[in-house]
Amino acid sequence: MRYLGDRLHAAGLSANVIRLAGHGTTPEDMEGVTWEDWYGSVLAGLDELAAHCSEIVVVGQSMGALLALKLAAEHRERVRGLVLLAPALVTSMPWLPWVTPLIPFVMTVAGDRFRFVGKDGGSDVADDAARAAIPSYTRTPLRAVGQLVRLQEHVRALLPEVQQPILVIHSSQDHTCPLENVAILQRELPNPVRTLILRDSFHVVSIDKDRDVVAAEVTAFVANGCGAGA
C-alpha cells in the first residue's frame, strides 16, 4: 500500500498505512493472531489518524477491505467514506467456508504437516517486476485461512449497516477474489456503489499494471469529498 499512500501524500492528503497484526514479520507470527487482532490494528490506526485529521476515508485491499467495511459500520461518525480494492467477501475457492470447521481437527490429527499453505507462483500480480518486489509471505498459516472465513461471515452480516459513500476497484482478471464480490456489494449495501473494473491487473491492484489509474481514482475520490456534488 506504500505506493498508493505516497501518491495520496503527494496530493496533499494525510495517509496512515497500517501494518496489521501478524503481517510484515513471519508466517509464524500470523499463525497466532485472530481476525479480532487484525481489526484491533485498524482501530489503533484510526485513532492515530484522527488525532491529525477531521475527515477520514478508509482504504482497504483484499482482506483489508473487509476490515474497512466493519470499521465503517461501527464508526459511522468517524469514517467519511470507503475505498475497497479487490474486496475479499468471497474467494476463488468457494469450498473454503465448508472446510473451515474442519481446520481444528486437521491441525490435531496432522500436526505440522498442514500448518501452512504454500503460495505457488507468488502473489496474484500481473506485473512481473511488481510481483518480484512485493513483500509477502511465501506461505499462509492454515489457522489464518480459517480466520479470514470467519471475518467474511461477520462482515457480510454488517453490509446493510454501511451508509458511507464507497468506491470499489476490482479487476476482471483477479484470480484470488472473483468479480462476484462487486455484485455482492452492489446488491447488499444500502446505497449505490461507485465501481471501477480494471482489465490489465490481477488481484493486488494497488501495485499492478493499473496502479497509476488506481492511485488517480482513489486520490480524486478522497480529495473531492467521496463524490460529493459529482
Image (tube, helix red, strand yellow):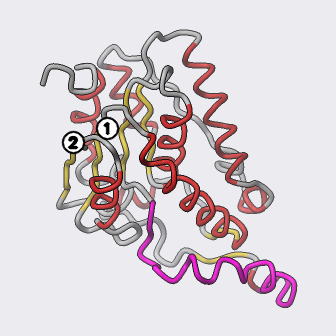
Q: How many C-alpha atoms fall within 10 Å of the one at disc 1: few (<14), some, or many (≥20)?
A: many
Using the image, determine if residue 130 lies above or below residue 73: below
| Residue lying at 56% horizontally and 57% vertically, measured from the top left | 136
Task: Give the quarter of the image for residue 105.
Answer: bottom right
Q: Secondary structure at mark 1?
A: strand
Q: Secondary structure at mark 2?
A: strand
Quadrant holding the C terminus? top left
The answer to whether the residues at label 1 and label 2 have Cβ atoms under 8 Å apart is yes
Q: Which residues are magenta?
A: 89-113
Residue 95 horizontal/vertical position (percent)? 51, 83
* Amino acid at circle 2: Arg
Q: Main secondary structure of the magenta part?
A: helix
Residue 83 horizontal/vertical position (percent)? 36, 39
Which residue occupies the foreground of this view, 214 or 130? Answer: 214
Mark 1–mark 2 distance (CA, rounded to whole Å): 6 Å
Q: How many C-alpha atoms fall within 10 Å of the one at disc 2: few (<14), some, or many (≥20)?
A: some
| Residue lying at 57% horizontally and 76% vertically, measured from the top left | 97
- Residue 194 got which mark? 2
- Residue 166 got which mark? 1
* Amino acid at circle 1: Ile
